[in-house]
Image: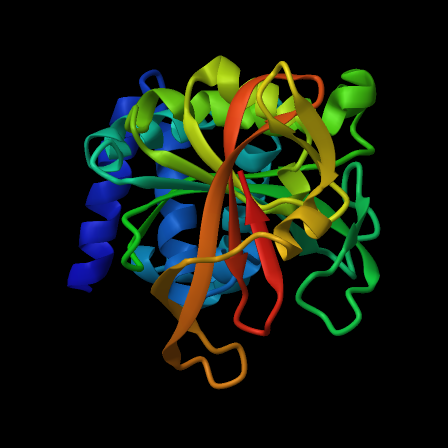
Amino acid sequence: MKIMKRLQGFVQRITELAGDLTHGEAKLASDLVVGISQTQSVLLSETARVINEAEGSSEADDAKALMRTEQRLSKGLAKMKSGLDALPQAWLKFAAPTVRRLKFVTVDGTDMTKPYGGTFEYLDKVRDGSAPGKPIKPGYWMINIEAADGHGHHIPLALTPFSTQDPVYRDKGDKAWSLTFQEEMRQVVPVTAKDATWLFDRGFDDNEHFRFMREIDRRHVVRLKRNRNVLVGDETKSSVQNIAMFAEGLKKPYRASLRYVDKTSHAQKTCQVFFNYVPVRLPDVEGSFWLTVVTGTRGEWSFAL
């Protein structure tokens, strides 16, 4: 019970930071957070049951009261414009003092499958990365941004769904995917440390992304694809090299011990890696970069800029 009261107090502080929320909107936010936390379910019927129990509904009115509460929650969430839309920025304002002390920001694209959501708005088709074979299923794409200290402690900054079927997305044109991620990253840049390192996986190995990171002036590391070409040498005398072939012939004189989690046992382990780093440039992207080549845990090469 003490935990729920603390949680309600926390939600109240966030809703106050959001500004002009009505009493009903603030209550809706509190009800949803407490209901989902207690039931471990996002079903409105489950949240409504928790709310009614807390408010002491009589047994005779249980069914009707449950329906009224569920309809109230549904109606509040269905509003096209709501004070609740300010909650993501309110959270960033609340978290900013802690986030600015963290050394890393991770940005990842993931998915949320909805196999039974046939009537959901702008339902998309996504690749289920958590299922064997990564099958295509109905669902939504997700943008996940977190701040981290490098020792297993994370603070969520954004967890935003989007659909490629949404007309707003389609209106962005050929660069819609990149622009959607960039819009979300712009929202969190002001609360992050100027010297924090932003971390990206292979999906961000794109010249447009490298230009964007220059624009927002943030240090970053991107894991590269094997078919990426780089320019080796100075501007007066350089050669185009395939990154995989270049990495294979590069000596790795440096060594480090890295911590990782075994995917089978989920146990924390360490492995020895060998690496090197060299200056390179990218075709059609201004400036120079450091290419880091690391031996992987399974004898594979990993490349990062």
At a point 83% along the width and 21% down the height, the residue shown is: 174
Residue 4 versus residue 233 in the image, above or below: below
Q: Is residue 12 above or below residue 111?
A: above
Viewer-nearest residue: 208 or 126: 208
Q: Give the residue drawn at x 36%, y 37%.
A: 27
Is 115 displayed left or right of 258 in the figure?
right
- The residue nearer to you, when weighing 52 against 272, is 272
Q: Is residue 155 left or right of residue 214?
A: left
Q: Nearer the viewer, residue 7 or 77?
A: 7
In this view, the residue farthest toward the left is 2
Using the image, determine if residue 15 lies above or below residue 269: above
Residue 14 drawn at (x, y percent): 28, 33
In the rendered image, residue 66, in percent from the top left (x then y), is placed at 51, 57
Q: Residue at x 60, y 27 (%)?
A: 233
Q: For this rendering, which residue is in front, 1 or 223?
A: 223
Residue ID at (63%, 44%): 224
